[in-house]
Image: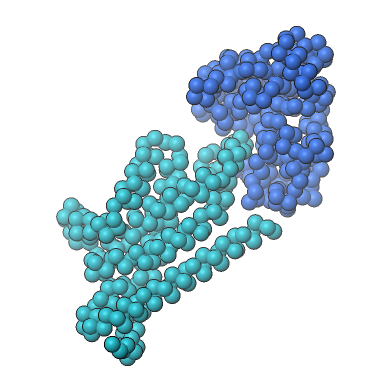
Amino acid sequence: MSFDFNLVYQSFPLLLEGALVTIEITAISVGIGFLLGLFVSICRLSGLKVIGFLAVSYVNIIRGTPMLVQIFLIYFALPMVIGHRIDPMVAAVAACSINSGAYVSEIFRAGIQSVDKGQMEAGRSLGLTWPQAMRYVILPQAFKHVIPPLGNEFISMTKETSLVSVIGFEELTRRGQLIIAKTYGSFEIWLTVAFIYLIMTFGIARFVSFLERRFATDDRN
Amino acid sequence: MIEIKDLRKSFGKLDVLKGINLTLQDQEVVVIIGPSGSGKSTVLRCINYLEPPTSGEIIVDGLSMTNNKNINAVRMEVGMVFQRFNLFPHMTVMDNITLAPIKTRHISKKEAEASALQLLQKVGLEEKKDAYPEMLSGGQQQRVAIARALAMKPKFMLFDEPTSALDPEMVREVLDVIKDLVNDGMGMLIVTHEMGFAREVADRVLFIDEGVIMEEGKPDDVFSHPQHDRTKLFLSKIL
């Protein structure tokens, strides 16, 4: 078996376009997932019964079902309820964000709970409200602890966006499939696709360790 | 005036406070002593509702803490200093002190910093205003914590074993700051194991054991002529 470098060379621009779409959907999903996760973790720790229960249910449902099924539900099942089609991009971002939000909320919960209990007490004893103490005292400290696990989540999400290829959304993996359908170059294309994912996740990992170092130095001066 | 009426607190099946009645007049200094686990700290923590009481009532200047709306208002009038300082590690000394006044009293940053500087002078740490807590010694951190509580201009202060987490050579500097406050006429409740200090500053001493006030009186009476066997036993161990 020979390795067709020419095929790699010719498909590369198309795959890079797909990679850009992967980056786009990952960035948007992680962004929304971050805000959603923060919100849900705060709901969960608010001590308000109904809101806390809803937050826990959301996390359990998302973590307890495959993301592939979640994508199908949003893209195929939801239109039957609301009565019109959903754009693949919207469905893809929605599925990834909702999925990411559940995992991010658990990351934030752990981060918030890792902050010493005396911090909240000191804030409250000074007359700060719970949201004020959360915002000015607890979250800035929790944030530093959550950078590494958030980085992991970012990397996972980059790879998991490949699942949205099943609804025909043309990100990196789908591009690879389409090129192979025409050229039968399975070996070359999948290897190239894997390589591009690796470059992307490696880049994110470097970015996260840069953030970690920066926040670590902030502490010292 | 702080009034505590039949305060009871249970953690699960454990009854920590079994009916505490106590009145703290304005400018009065009351020191609470007692063995560890006797519920001394819990009394303080119930006053500002860091621990909501199981039953009983706390009334601060006529405001009952049973009404949730009063909780934050009362907390702004009652400063608290913790055994482990609980400074905010991600903020400078200055920001530690000005955060609550700016957010709750809605005063300008400039105004808050000016009065914070005065408070730092009072506790002898003005040159540390830009330092982070971890760069300070335990005694310095506790003095900052006192300044932080004072920045809310409270009427009363609660000290929860303010020197118990300190190295011995730093106890004095913190007690001196508290003594200054006593001289300024601040009303306060102090939980401490520093008996010499208690004797010196207290208007009244309470001995709490097993969740009840066993004995109370003038410091000289309690320390020199304890009536209760429990008090005698405790003092014989500690003095």
Question: Compared with residue B161, is residue A83 higher up or lower down, i.e. above or below?
Answer: below
Q: In this view, does B59 lie to the left or right of B130?
A: left
Q: Is residue B139 left or right of residue A136?
A: right
User: Residue A118 sits in which quadrant?
Assistant: top right
Residue at the spot 29% in from the left edge and 52% down from the top edge: A65
Q: Nearer the viewer, residue B40 or A139?
A: B40
Question: Compared with residue B51, is residue A74 higher up or lower down, i.e. above or below?
Answer: below
Q: Which of A46 and A116 is in front in this view?
A: A116
Q: Which residue lies furthest to the bottom in this view?
A: A6
- The answer, for residue A149, to whether it is visible in the render is yes
The quadrant in which the C terminus of chain A is found is: bottom right
Q: Residue furthest front?
A: A1
In the rendered image, residue B62, in percent from the top left (x then y), is placed at 60, 20
Q: Is residue B51 left or right of residue A40?
A: right
- The answer, for residue B115, to whether it is visible in the render is no
Q: Nearer the viewer, residue B25 or A63?
A: A63
Q: Which shade of the palette goes to chain B?
A: blue
Residue at the spot 57% in from the left edge and 50% down from the top edge: A141
Q: Which shade of the palette goes to chain A?
A: cyan
Question: Compared with residue A172, is residue A93 higher up or lower down, i.e. above or below?
Answer: above
In the rendered image, residue B108, in percent from the top left (x then y), is placed at 65, 46
Q: Is residue A187 left or right of residue B213?
A: left
The colour scheme used here is by chain
Residue at the spot 64% in from the left edge and 61% down from the top edge: A217
In the rendered image, residue B161, in percent from the top left (x then y), is placed at 71, 31
Q: How many marks?
A: 0
Residue at the spot 72% in from the left edge and 22% down from the top edge: B33
Question: Compared with residue B40, is residue A99 higher up or lower down, i.e. above or below?
Answer: below
The quadrant in which the N terminus of chain A is found is: bottom left
